[in-house]
Structures are given as structure tokens and as C-alpha cells.
Amino acid sequence: MAIMVAAIAIAAPTLANFFRGRTLDSEARRLLALTHSGQSRAISEGIPTRLWLDVSQHTYGLEQDPGWSDRDPKAVEFPFDQDIDVQVINSDRPASRSSQSQPPSTAARKANPRNLPEIRFLPDGSIDERSPLALHLEDRNGTSRWLAQTTNHLNYEIRDTFN
């Protein structure tokens, strides 16, 4: 009995770290799957789709741009795990000349009234240039994963580091 108690005492912290790491990986994979879903939906329906992030409320979701219909019946919303902090890394690419010279349209302001960070997928399958370059997910132990745009800026991928 004493040997079992000693083995459990030694294994418990290791197992706890294992399961916390699994939560971080699961969250990163769920976000990646949602990017693929949003991109596919934008292409198949021909309507811009956005993955929004409300970091302060620990939620994120996927929906089509407002204005195409009154309500998006396929919109989804998910909570982040409370032990995971998310940081949005904005693009270091300069905005195009046309978007710099024009104020945001009324439709753009209505599309994101809470001014949340969002990854926006266009009907041609590309990622809007104003979308974040990366999302940094970190658990309370300091373990982190990055959801970052690929080098060709057409998709996102999970990375252990961000360069």
C-alpha cells in the first residue's frame, strides 16, 4: 500500500501537467479547425466569413459578415478555457494604399461593432490583410502554442514558436 501511495504521489504532478498541456493543444486545434471551417464556408457560400475573438470575455466564434442576411443560422460561439490566456498579434504588413486613404465604411463598422480582433476570410479563400498575423495561446504554466499565418498568408497553422 505504501508503494502505491508513493507511486501516485510521484505520478500525480506529471499527469496534471500532461492534462493541462492537452487542454492547450485541444484549444489550439479547435481554433485551427475553425479557421479551416471559416475559410471553406467563405468559399462555398461566396460570403466573407469572420472568426472573432473576445479575449476579455474568453469567447470566440465564427459567423458570416453582417449585411448578407439578417441572421446567420450557422454562427457558432465557443468559450476559451479559463486557464488559457490569448494574445492577438496584429499584422506587421502595412495596409494597402487604398485602405489607408479611405475611412472604414458603414458596413465595416456594422460588421464589427464591438471592435473585436477578427480573422476575416474572403470568398476567394484568401485572408483579409487586416487579419491578425498570429494568436498566442499560453496556459498558466507558461506553456504556449501559436496559431500563425503560413508563410504564403493563405492559411493558419499551429506552431510551438513564432518567428
Image (cartoon, rainbow, N blue to C red):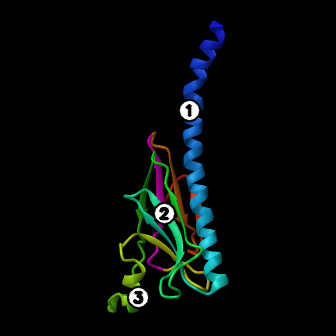
**What residue is shown with label 1?**
16
Residue linked to disc 3: 107
How many C-alpha atoms fall within 10 Å of the one at disc 1: few (<14), some, or many (≥20)? few
The magenta segment: 129-140
Q: Is residue 105 visible?
A: no
- Which residue bears the numbered disc 2? 60
Where residue 34 appears, as percent x and y from the top left, is 59, 66
Is residue 10 visible in the rendered image? The answer is: yes
Mark 3 or 1: the one toward you:
3
| Secondary structure under the numbered disc 3 in the rendered image | helix
What x and y, as percent, mark residue 50? 51, 75
Q: Position of residue 60 (x, y in %)?
A: 48, 63
The amino acid type of the residue labelled 3 equals Ala
Who's the residue at 56% across and 32% down the image?
16
Q: Nearer the viewer, residue 157 or 45?
A: 45
**Which of the pair 134/33 is nearer the observer?**
33
**Image quarter of the N terminus:** top right
Q: Residue furthest top?
A: 2
